[in-house]
Image (cartoon, rainbow, N blue to C red):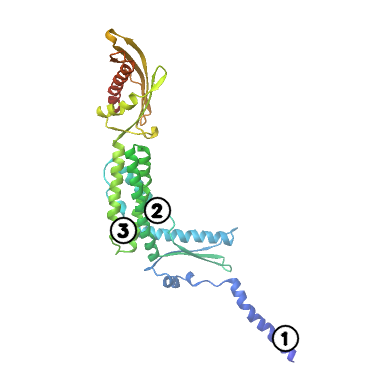
Amino acid sequence: MKNRINNFIIPILAGWLLLPCALAAQGSAPDWTDSDVRGMLYPAETYYTGFAQMSVSANEGQEKVLNRAKQLALGELSERVRVMVSSKKTSTDISIGGSDIEEQIRSRFISTVGTASQTEVVGSNLKTHYDRTKGEAYALAFVSKAELASYYRKQISLYLNKVDGALQTAGELAEKGYKARARKHCESIVDAFAMIAYAQDLLTAIDEAADEGSLQQSRSERLRNTLVQTLTDLENSIFVYVECKETVEDEEVVYIADKLPELLTEGDCGCSFTESEEDADYVIKVNAYLARCNDAVGGTVFCYADATVNLYNSRTQKTLKPKIDEAKGGWTGKNYTKAGEEAFDELAKKIAEKIVPMMKN
């Protein structure tokens, strides 16, 4: 009798002991899959959320359906944040100005803000669950408004510091004549301004009490105006690169290279000079040589210098070859060196007289 009772009780006890394991293997649905509970766990006042529930399709395993649910939940979260920001007055509504440069900046600015608003929300968390019995996947993406606001406060400062440094570098490069490099630095921070604007918009939408200290709008506006002015100055300025090869009886000398920049400036070319050919709007290449020297009465010497000149316009990518008249220089006491210098000085003046009108046109 005792054995019969044991034979009856032991299977029952074993079944009760194994039941939790069976339930664990099946997996009970977490609280957040229920919409009412989810609303209490992640209230709209303090969280942005995205939720997805989908059934596994034919020839699709657990991993694939969970990935689809994850992407849908993250997409919904991103869309909710984007709509929230768009519903407020955004920084893209501000007037940057009416010049061509300002319009180019505005166009790229708006495009980048739009792209930023559609990216995955920074700092978002993700939870997933797969119900084997139903063949359904669940995903929840969520982010704390407080954490999101804190992140974008830091981003505003980070990007503004980056912009400030880039503008200082661009100004230093422009002063040295490196126009192309200065422009690249300026163009590289247009996207940074867009990210600043997006961060300000998001912060304003999350926290209506956000003040100047956290938004830093005055600083961003000042730097944006500096960017516009720097690009305008670079666009209106003319940068010239001068390369001279000068010879006297096959020996290299330097006369025109020292004189030409000053003569071009005096001719009101409105230009600055750069040591980098790739940064120049105009590239002037001079091949000058002393053609001959003649003795005259009383020990006077007359020397004649000639040159070929190429003027390359980097904007039009065209090369002009102005005709330069032969230049004459004279000196007493049979001083051929001084007579040659005078010839080269006169040749430099002739080159400047020909080139300045070409650059102005």
Image quarter (top left, top right, bottom left or bottom right) of the C terminus: top left
Task: Identify the amino acid type marked 3.
Answer: Leu
The foreground one among 152 and 306 is: 306
Name the side, left or right, on which 31 lies relative to 328.
right
Residue that label 2 marks: 116
Secondary structure under tag 2 reads helix
Q: Position of residue 153 (x, y in %)?
A: 35, 60
Q: Position of residue 99 (x, y in %)?
A: 27, 41
Task: Identify the amino acid type marked 2.
Answer: Ala
Kindly report which numbered mark, 3 or 2, lies closer to the viewer in this rendering.
3
Is the residue marked by circle 3 packed among few (<14), some (14-19), or many (20+) residues within 10 Å?
many
Residue that label 3 marks: 215
The foreground one among 211 and 198 is: 211
Image quarter (top left, top right, bottom left or bottom right) of the N terminus: bottom right
Question: Would you place residue 74 above or below residue 239 in this image?
Answer: below
Marked residue nearer the N-terminal end (2 or 1): 1
Kindly report which numbered mark, 2 or 1, lies closer to the viewer in this rendering.
2
Looking at the rendering, which quadrant does residue 238 occupy?
Answer: top left
Query: Which residue is the extreme one toward the front?
Result: 333
Question: Would you place residue 268 above or below residue 15 in this image?
Answer: above
Cα gap from disc 3 to disc 1, whole angstroms: 76 Å
